[in-house]
Image (cartoon, rainbow, N blue to C red):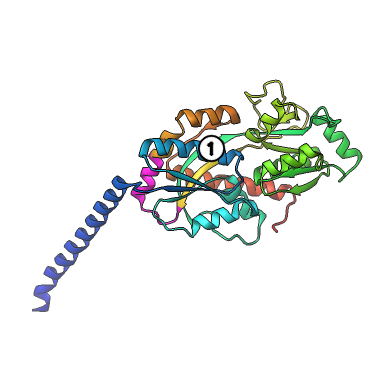
Amino acid sequence: MTAFHLPSRRRALSTAVTLAAASLGFAGTAMAQAYPAKAITFVVPFAAGSATDQLARAIGQSITTDTKQPVVIDNKAGASGMIAAQAVAKAPADGYTILITTNTTHAANEHLYKKLSYDPVKDFAPISGLGKGGQVMVVNAASPYKSVADVVAAAKKTPGKLSFGSGSSSSRMAGEMLKQLAGVDILHVPYKSNPLAITDLLGGQIDLMITDTSTGVPQVKAGKLRALGYSTQKRSSQLPEVPTIDEAGVKGYDMGYWFAAYAPANTPPAVVARLNELVAAATRSAAAKSFYDTAGSEAWTTTPDELARFQAAETVKWGKVIKAAGIEAE
């Protein structure tokens, strides 16, 4: 009798599993169709006015226009983005708390800190890349340094006397790469964000920094800072007269940065897909284009899987740069 009824039980179980899966699929589809049904929070790891903040606001503005739901910007600056990343990692996986971040939290930090309060891979669901850009080496307009060569010469003459500030891993690594490739000793001064470092640069508390263009270029155009070099192998469209740091004599120098969006791990795939659509459309909006033009960066979108693969490759790359710079995890 048991043998006779076993296939029936198996068929019943199989049917139940199929129906459950279908139910989950319908639920996921329904959730995606209803999403977003309330305000979305964009958590930004850096201060208001930073490049990441500006891009988050531009993307948020577009999503609000498309969905009629508000996007709230929550700046959680400090600890190289770890405060913000941890907050999103622990947030409900419902698509309403999103991390708008950079390579700082998702490629560099694991090589800079012995213990992270989040896992860059396991704690997040990749949504999409948002943009890529370069950085500008700047000094106070009253500084005696008129070129990258001047800075290098001064650093070689008085090792450890010059200082550079940074408020992100990208900015710090840019300075460390300069030290490494130019063979100089320059003191690193950490800040919670690049705008705060800029304030001290304007006040004469530090000698130089290599910062994102959206933070540095306005000060250059206002005549308060002097641009000495650009961090990628291609000159900035905003500062075409400024040579790349490589052109200026530090051969092999190339250090850019990227922005991306992540949701908490286990966010329903249908919601991630919907967010990917919204973000992709937002990068083409007038507000986003204005940011890219002003920041000297470019739009860059991906599928969730492409972002995951890119992040993995970048993590290896940043690890090599950090190791070569002789930086030990804190």
In the rendered image, residue 161, in percent from the top left (x then y), is placed at 87, 44
Q: Residue at x 88, y 44 (%)?
A: 159
Left or right of residue 181, residue 4 in this image: left
In the rendered image, residue 213, in percent from the top left (x then y), is placed at 65, 33
Residue type, mark 1 in image: Leu
Q: Residue at x 47, y 37 (%)?
A: 59
Residue 8: quadrant of the picture: bottom left
| Image height of 131 relative to 323, above or below | above
| Image height of 182 relative to 316, above or below | above
Q: Secondary structure at mark 1?
A: helix
Residue lying at the far right in this picture: please name it.
Answer: 157
In the rendered image, residue 323, in percent from the top left (x then y), is placed at 70, 50
Image quarter of the N terminus: bottom left
Residue lying at the far bottom in this picture: please name it.
Answer: 1
Does the magenta run of residues contain 270? yes
Q: Which residues are magenta?
A: 264-277
Majority secondary structure in the magenta region: helix
Left or right of residue 309, residue 253 in this image: right
Left or right of residue 25, residue 76 in this image: right
Q: Is residue 136 visible?
A: yes
**Disc 1 target residue:** 55
In the rendered image, residue 261, in percent from the top left (x then y), is placed at 49, 45
Left or right of residue 19, residue 127 in this image: right
Q: How many labels, in total?
A: 1
Residue 274: quadrant of the picture: top left
Image quarter of the C terminus: bottom right
